[in-house]
Image (spheres, rainbow, N blue to C red):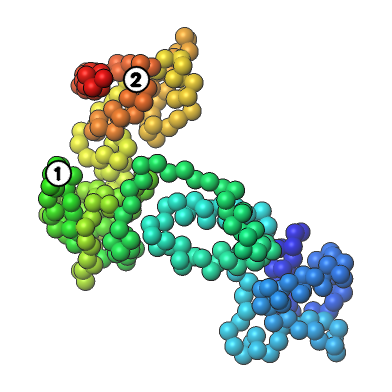
Amino acid sequence: MDRTERFYKIEMLIRSRGCVHIDTLLAELEVSRATFKRDLAYLRDRLGAPIEYDALTNGYRFGEEHWRAVKHELPGLWLSEHELHALLTLHQMLEGLDEGELLGRHLAPMFERIHTMLGLDEGAAKDLQRRVKLISTARRRANTAHFEKVCSGVLSGQRLVLDYRKRSGGATPSIEAREVSPQRLVHYRHAWYLDAWCHKNEGLRRFALDAVQAARLLDAKAKRLPLKTVEADMDRGYGIFAGGAEQWAELLFKPEAAAWVAHEEWHPAQQVQAQSDGSLLMRLPYVDPTELLMDLLRHAGQVTVRAPDSLRHAFADRLRAAVDQL
């Protein structure tokens, strides 16, 4: 077992048996006396474990203050060194999603303890974090205060009033107050969205959190829908667009693009079929062509829209408009 596992093993043995003889500890840990002494010193000095030597039994136990006051606990679950490294990697991913360090400031003490358990000083910890790099492009940030209230509404089941900026208003978009019952948060392509029941429209709607100008929690309980109902209504479309009649796109990618597209998931329900000439035929559902057209433009010249006609014409219009700008 590695050093981290030994720390938990020492604590578990003493906690369960009260006072453990030195020979028992060495046998259970399968280490030398010198290694045990080093582990013990680390537990005491770096992790604050109140472990004392009992001369009468030639063993080790927790000090009296451990039982009179709040019991000492090692952070987290019984995790190996490899699992702690995985947690630190997850921390980097979390920071990429965290709006204004809303969650990070609460989790920081835990990750500081993990650094300590791994024997990392501040410089080594920062170097380790720099070994994992997440690149975000076109990120849209939500206001931290609004994000926190929306999170509270989702988790507590309270209604919200959102002052929402409509994107269709051009240079001077209008702001409208909406009373909603939050259902779930969605993170998609570096932006946060709220799926909620809109009491004005009496239906499910998706709100971009960066367009929320203010958010207020109400005392009223939210109208909670089964998640299966939310998923069935909001996840049918392509990308972030939801609602509307479902259509199926049929796309043919040339061999040069097929080598990449074959390993991509454009939609969970997509159907792909390799062709004899190396090209790739893909079928997928959508309800609004906006985002699908943007992704097709990435493969302009390498993809043919075979169906439906409305999507083929819309794609051709986008290509002609792009050429007209040259």
Q: Identity of the amino acid at label 1?
A: Ala
Residue 71 at what x, y percent from top left? 61, 82
Q: 127 above or below 312?
A: below
Farthest residue to the top: give it: 277
The one nearer the camera, 99 or 251, is 99
Which residue is the site of mark 1? 171
Residue 171 at what x, y percent from top left? 14, 44
- Whichever of labels 1 and 2 marks the residue nearer the N terminus, that label is 1
Instruction: Name the residue rendered at 26%, 66% in the picture.
Output: 158
Q: Say whether residue 180 is visible.
A: no
Residue 300, numbered label? 2
Residue 69 at what x, y percent from top left? 59, 88
Count of picture labels: 2
Instruction: Name the residue rendered at 19%, 62% in the picture.
Output: 161
- Mark 1–mark 2 Cα distance, whole angstroms, equals 30 Å
The one nearer the camera, 70 or 177, is 177
